[in-house]
Structure formats: structure tokens, C-alpha cells
Amino acid sequence: MKILRRLGISALALGLGAPFAGSPLRTQQRGLDLDSIARAIDEGSDHVSARQLAEWIRDRRPGLRVIDVRSPAEFHAGAIPTAENVPIDQLAKLRFAPGQMIVLYSQEGAHAGQAWVMLRSLGVTHAVFVPGGLADWREEVLSPLLSANASPAERARIAELSHYFGGSPRIGGGQEGEVAATAQIGRGSRRRGC
Amino acid sequence: MAFGWALECAGLGDPPKLAGQFYLRDFTVLKVMLSAMLTAMLGVFWGGRLGLFDPGTFYVPETYLLPQLVGGLVFGLGFVLSGLCPGTSCVALASGRIEGAATMLGLFAGVLLVGLAFPAIEPLYRSTPYGPLTLQRLTGLPYGVVVALVTLVAVSILAWVAKWEARR
């Protein structure tokens, strides 16, 4: 009976001490949770449009943290306002608070998407990336095309957002004008690289 | 060998003793199961914490809710009918009980039957999958807190059983 009691008490002590002992998992949250990644990609909760990001920045969304994963030289040549520059090779060293919403972007989105997977492998689930990158930012926020088909309210909303960031909307005609303008912009602002 | 030896020591090669658990006459099975779970859980947690191994690499069986409920019911029925489970049937046979041989025969017959019927029951077999479900994933609580809660519950039940046995 005595030994039983002793065993019970030691089990209790070990068990009740567990919450204060920290995690026994050495590989905590490292390694990829492929199911959740596939689900996020499927649902589209892995990315955010440039225009949505612009609204978040304008509305000062709490905990928003915009990260430019390009090289410092590219960053200084022009970046999204409020962004901080963390080149891809520095990303793993970063610390992320739980309440933060991390938005990654690169020149055209590919590197940001890869950075998103890197953060996922580090256990950071509150991150998204801008698929079109800075190129999308320029096209959709700085010089958005105000389509003639859009409602006046919608056009005013887009124009206002653009003006907020110092951009100027382009006035588009009907369908054909839109396509032509987009093609032109495509040649102008998109460049090779990510 | 050590597993069988421990089972025999606990008296789990004895069918009436095992069946007694289902009639709440004998709590040996509950005591053995709870103390084994407690030992394993604390061992995994503290062993990992002290750096002896990494619990994150341990295999956790996947949960398929419906088929495992059905399987558990069939298993329990066989358990109370024969008074033995697969592990203890080997122990019982080793200590010369004929019930052990009968149970093992039934065990292999059941395995064969399920294997033959598998194409027909495969949809059920793969239904309601939840992946490797653990208490901390289910409750969202930290690992250490789950360990403390399970310890508290298990030790309380063991203490209560000990008191109940002493009263009899």
C-alpha cells in the first residue's frame, strides 16, 4: 500500500509538473503540414490581392506586417509603403508575434509564394502573399484601370485608393480599350525576374 | 516476452478476471490499463523533455471514427465472451489455458473473414477519417496541460478503485 501511494504521488508530481516543463517536442512545428498547406492553397487563404493589401494599409489594420523579400537594392528602388525589407535568406531568422498578419511580396509573386511555404515550414500560419507582387501593386493600386463597365461607386472607390498612395488611375474605354491598355501596361511595367 | 510476463503477473491470463471488469466485479483490467497509459504518457513526455528522444517522430495511429467505433464494439463483444483480448490470449495459451487457444483461433478466423470481406466493407473502413488525432489536437490545449489533466483523472480513478477494493 505504501509503495502504491508513493507511485501515485510521484505520478501526480510528474503529471502536474508537465505544464511548466515546456515542450518535449524538439521538432516543434518544423516540417511541413502538407494537408493544411494544400487546404490553404485550395481555399485561397494563402494570398491576398494588391488592392486588398492597399486597403489594409490605408485602414491601418492592426498587426499588419508587410515584408518585401527582394534584395535591398530592389527595395530601395521602390517598394510598397510601410513594408520592411527582409531578403529571402534572412527570412528564417525573423521572429513573428502570434497576432501579426504577415503579407509577403516580391517583384512578381513567385519568390513571395516560395517565402510563404518557407514560413509555413517554420510554423507561421498567419501569413499571406501577394500573387502579382509589386507589378500588381503598380497595376491595381498606383495606376488602376477605371473600366467603363464598372459602377461609378466602384470607380470612385478605386480612384480614391489610388490617390491615397499617390497614384493616378487610368480611364479605360469599353472592353477593347481595357484589353489594349492592359497589354500595354504588361509590356511597360512587368519585367523579367521574380 | 517482457510484455507477456507483465500481463501474467497482473493476472490478465485469467478469463474470469478479465470478464469481471465488464460486470464491475474486478478492476484489474482498468488498473493495468490506466497505470500503463500513465507510465507511457509520463515516460514519453519527460523522456522527450530530457532529450532522450523526440516524441514528435513517434507514430500516432490515424483515427477513423465510425469504423473504429464498430470495431471497438465487435472487439468488446469478443472480449467479454471469451474473457481474453489478443495479447492476453497468448498469455493464457502460454500458461496452458485452453481458452487461450480458442480465443486465438477466433482471432485468426476473424482476421481471415475481414480480409475476405474487405472489398465489400472498404468504404466503411475508410469513412470518417480524422488523421492522427491526439487529445491536444482535439482540445487545442498545450501538451503539458493535457498530460497534467490526464494524470489527474487517472490517479483519481486509481485512488478511488484502491479505496473501493479496500472497503470490500
Image (cartoon, grey):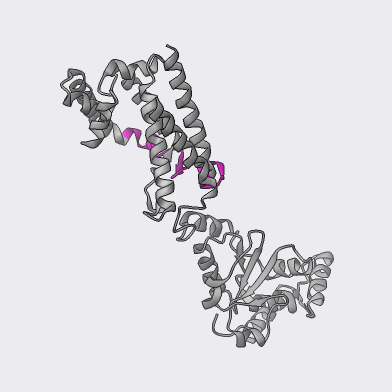
Q: Is residue B48 magenta?
A: no
- Name the one closer to the observer, B42 or B30: B42
Query: Exactly how many numbered labels are in the figure?
Result: 0
In terms of image quadrants, where is residue A154?
bottom right
- Name the one closer to the observer, B17 or A132: B17
Q: Is residue B155 above or below residue B96?
A: below
Q: Is residue A86 left or right of residue B51?
A: right
Residue drawn at 49 percent across, 53 percent down: A23
Residue drawn at 55 percent across, 80 percent down: A194
Whether residue A127 can be seen here: yes
| Residue A24 locus on image (x, y percent) | 46, 52
| Residue A15 locus on image (x, y percent) | 49, 40
Segment tinted magenta in the rendering:
B120-144
- Name the one closer to the observer, B65 or B83: B83
- Name the one closer to the observer, A133 or A156: A133
- Residue situated furthest top in the rendering: B168
Q: Is residue B27 left or right of residue A102?
A: left
Q: Is residue B136 magenta?
A: yes
In terms of image quadrants, where is residue B77?
top left
| Residue A59 locus on image (x, y percent) | 79, 65
Q: Is residue B42 above or below residue A157?
A: above
